[in-house]
Amino acid sequence: MSLSDLLPLAVAVPLIGAALLAVTGHWIRRRGCDILAAVFTTAEVLVLLLLWLRTAHGTPSGSPASWLGGWRLHDGEGVGIVLVGDPLGVGFALLAALLVLAVVAYAWRYFDEPPARMPGTFPALVLLFEAGMCGFALTGDLFNAFVFFELMGVAAYALTGYRVEDPRPVQGALTFGIVNSLAAYCSLLGIGMLYARTGELGMAQIGHRLVEHRTDLLTVTAFVLVLTGLLVKAAAVPFHFWLPDAHAVAPTPVCMLLSGVMVELGVYGAARVYWTVFSGPGGMPPGAVRGVLVCLGAVTALVGSVMCWQQRHLKRLLAFSTIGHVGLFLIAVALLNADGTAGFALYAAGHAEAKAALFALTGVLLDQYGSVDEHGLFGKARALLGRTGVLYLVGGLALAGMPPFAAGLGKAVAEHAAGAWLPLLPVFFVTVSALTGGAVLRAFLRVFLGAGTHPREASAPETSGEGEEPEVRSPERRIPLPMLVVPAVLLASSLVLGLAPGIGRVFGRAGDLFVSRSDYTAAIGLTPPTQVHHATVLPGWTVEGVALGVLAVLLACALAAAAVWGRRLRGAVAAAGRAAMELASGRLARPLRVAHSGRLGDDVAWLAVGVAALLAAFSLLR
């Protein structure tokens, strides 16, 4: 079977599985549905693994492509849909498939109460979600990317509101759906404007046609509108308000996918659209894109990390941590070079493994105690310290960037690339890693060790995480083995990826091909095949990278210790530290907490503000 044959198979396998489960879910039992889902997700992983192994180092004839239905280009024009297998796109599809397999294994015993008449609903929706993610990562058609993105979104809305008997998931799913649908309208409008300008829907074809035009307001507006849909899915500030609310109410296995891979695909999509459509003449000036997206990434990183530190609801804490890391991903991608792009890919892979593991372990707490409240769980999980607690600690350290985990390596590579452009940028990476990792370590100290004194209740209203609807039939049951094995395997794979020999060469080559328009246009037949001669090799573990990773971990530990034991300390220095923390929590963080009102109208207003700000910034800088 050729590489071109494997590309459509990567989209078809989960779609067939979802359809089969939807049809047969009425008649087969829960165990049968789980087995069927496991078969299809395993088959999808094997297809994408084979594809990735054969494309990871590049191929002599360029990236493979497959025209669905055989509708190829004629004289540079065509109406067919193409799938392109460049290493980075295949890698993200493989990451999505691996996380879906982990979720299916984790949920094997997680939901004891599937819908009585339709036990195949949850695995069918997960497979539909997987088809959308893989199709989005592989497609070379802009409208088709929109369709796959919305397929992914619709499945995500349904999975978020899976517990329809509880009004909170339904409300969270509606907010999620409405905000993302408005963003989708923006993207569709932008695609329509590009079609009106070029008469094409293929990404490479649009970029090829834009050469004939100058960069005017129509191009800028189309770029901003298309970018809006991607940034909303990526949860970049100020498009992020739906994310923590959705995470707070979604079933835990769904959170593993939302934070583990969906938001990363939003950043990947923004980079894909820029490099394939807008990076040439007639597109967007690189200086404007770099300046605006680096600023957006820095704001996103700071807002996400500060809000993460403020949370006591463990799912919201991890959700805001994701927003903080999305800011770092945006900075890496906005550098507009192969190093930054490859660093983002490696960082996203490591972050996905660590974050999915932490969500899975939070699900164990919900399983055992019916709560995800850091204050309410104070000291209650001492009995789980031996296995769940240790894994939670390791996940927190990996999230903070501890060597040699893959998240730490990706952070080190992205830091190196960012520091080469602006020496101040590594400060953001260390600060965000320390704050988000410190928040997780603080929760570990309080929940699993009962360290320090019981936290004081805040005077202002806050989301506590108490009174959560149980996601299992019988709380305090024995923890099912898959719920511990899955996070352990995820963390172990993160360790292996961080130590894998030659990983820098593989990701460096992927970054080279991703930023090469000539490779992409040659793959679809617009230009003759040319060899990409760049040979970027990522720096890997350097003394600087290890030192910054260790510094971030030490800062995270210090912050967690200060939060837990700070009130016991005596002396002028300790008092000054407490005053500074209270000042930061009050004057600086309070406006952010007020802005996160949870009201749908406010979320839509911020969406409009974000679109207007991007439009103004790009219009001024074009």
Image (cartoon, helix red, strand yellow):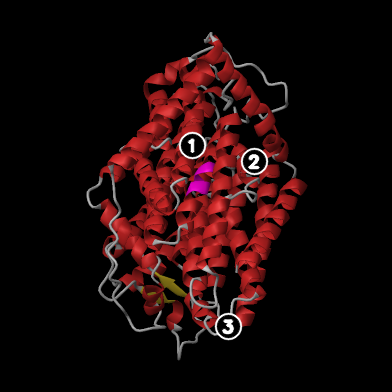
Residue 307 x/y as whole percent: 60, 35
Residue 415, compared with residue 366, is above or below; it is below
Q: Quadrant of residue 484?
A: top left
Report how far apart the C-alphas of labels 1 and 2 lie in the structure.
Answer: 24 Å
Residue 147, compared with residue 234, is above or below; it is below
Across the whole image, how many numbered discs are drawn on residues? 3
Decide whether residue 330 is among the magenta residues: no
**Residue located beneath label 3 in the image:** 213
The quadrant the C terminus occupies is: bottom right
Q: Amino acid at mark 2?
A: Asp
Q: Foreground residue, 174 or 513?
A: 513
Report how far apart the C-alphas of labels 2 and 3 lie in the structure.
Answer: 42 Å
**Residue located beneath label 1 in the image:** 431
The quadrant the N terminus occupies is: bottom left
Residue 428 x/y as whole percent: 49, 42
SS assignment at label 2: helix
At horizontal 28% and vertical 40% (from top left) the residue drawn is 543
**Residue located beneath label 2 in the image:** 245
Q: Does the magenta stretch mainly form a helix, a strand or a loop?
A: helix
Q: Are marks 2 and 3 in contact (CB under 8 Å)?
A: no
Instruction: For label 3, count other residues whose C-alpha is less than 10 Å away and answer few (under 14), some (14-19) or many (20+).
Output: few
Residue 141: in sight, yes or no? Answer: no
Q: Amino acid at mark 3?
A: His
Instruction: For label 1, count other residues whose C-alpha is less than 10 Å away and answer few (under 14), some (14-19) or many (20+).
Output: many
SS assignment at label 3: loop
Disc nearer the start of the sequence (1/3): 3
Range of magenta residues: 324-328
Disc nearer the start of the sequence (2/3): 3
SS assignment at label 1: helix
